[in-house]
Amino acid sequence: MPVARKPKTVKGFDDRHLHALSLAYGMSDVDALLPVIVDGTHASLLDVRTETSRKALLEDELGTWFVKQVPWYADDDVELARKHALTRQLGRTGLVPKMRTTRDGIGWTRIDGAAFEVTEYRRGCRFDGSTDQVRAAGAALATLHDCPVEHDGPAEDYRQLVAKHVRLAEEVTGANAPRRLLAVLRRNLTDQLPDDVWHALPMTFVHGDYSPWNIVFGSDGVIAVVDFDNSDVGSRLRDLVEGVLTAAGVRYQDDSTNFARPFRCVLDERLATAFLSGYLGATALTDAELACVNWFARAVHTELVALAILRGEIDDDSAAEVAAWQVDLSALVKEVLR
């Protein structure tokens, strides 16, 4: 996944976008671009739930579609083609919404230079924090990881990715940088997996942002996994740990993907066990992976803190708590496997 500074973006859609999308995708009888997600009788404004990029629902004669501006860090034709090649292969899992192609046969179109995608909209339920949903999220992740994919190019090195996010947090905050907090993150980076250990880990498809907000739930489990902007091939432990921490540890602000202030990640062992049970009940980890679980826990936590800095949601007041943070996720995995 590329790591890049966020540019200034324009909010919202207008009639020009609707017209351009209609032409590009050969749509007729297009109704409107609706900036909402409906969950039963509850509606959420998409620009409130997340500020990553413009999103909306679009209705035409074929049904309801999810329209999304591709985020700046994946807004590159090579990256888009790579990501689409991966997600097309994952279609056989039944968990990935179908991507609508343009009249030119590709999976995105550009409007005023920005890339937009149109995918099947699957109406379901939002994350409610229940044990059943968390367990289902773990099982769905195992299904994605067990789907074999062909991939050109090198696998993602998560060690480098975390380091890039920490450096970007330093660059973006500049003179206003939370120096004590960044010093903690830099110290965390000194604990790296040696190359021989890293290369012993199996490489699978990785989602790259496996959080409850990117999962659509139904009455019997997960009906869709969305937002593949960060997808790649790499160590699946990244997804596994991020799934546990975001579903059972990280606190969020209201009905959004923004981290709560102050940033907190206190593991709920009941929910963490549910996620791991769902995952490990469907697939198995290798001995090499089992030995690296706690390293990934620290690395994912470091990256989440770096993202919180980039969003302006954490400062030096949290430095001591971040420095003291630790979780023995390996012990929890072993307990689930027992």
Image: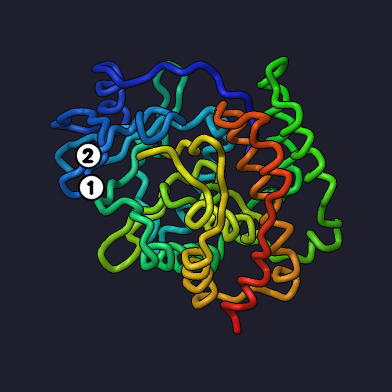
Is 69 left, or right, of 28 in this rendering?
A: right
Which residue of the protein is positioned furthest toward the bottom in this rendering?
338
Q: Position of residue 16 (x, y in %)?
A: 28, 16
| Amino acid type, label 2 | Ala
Distance CA(mark 2)–CA(mark 1): 6 Å
Q: Position of residue 118 (x, y in %)?
A: 34, 38
Tell me if I can see residue 103 in this picture: no
Per the image, the residue denoted by label 1 is: 39
Is 123 left, or right, of 200 in this rendering?
A: left
Badge 2 element: strand
Q: Quadrant of the C terminus?
A: bottom right
| Amino acid type, label 1 | Asp
* Figure quadrant of residue 303: top right
Per the image, the residue denoted by label 2 is: 43
Label 2: few (<14), some (14–19) or many (≥20) C-alpha neighbours in 10 Å: few
Badge 1 element: strand
Residue 242 in the image: above or below residue 56:
below
**Residue at coordinates 60% horizontally, 28% vertically from top-left?**
310
Tell me if I can see residue 209 in this picture: yes
* Figure quadrant of residue 239: bottom right
Foreground pick, 59 / 252: 252
Q: Are marks 2 and 1 in contact (CB under 8 Å)?
A: yes
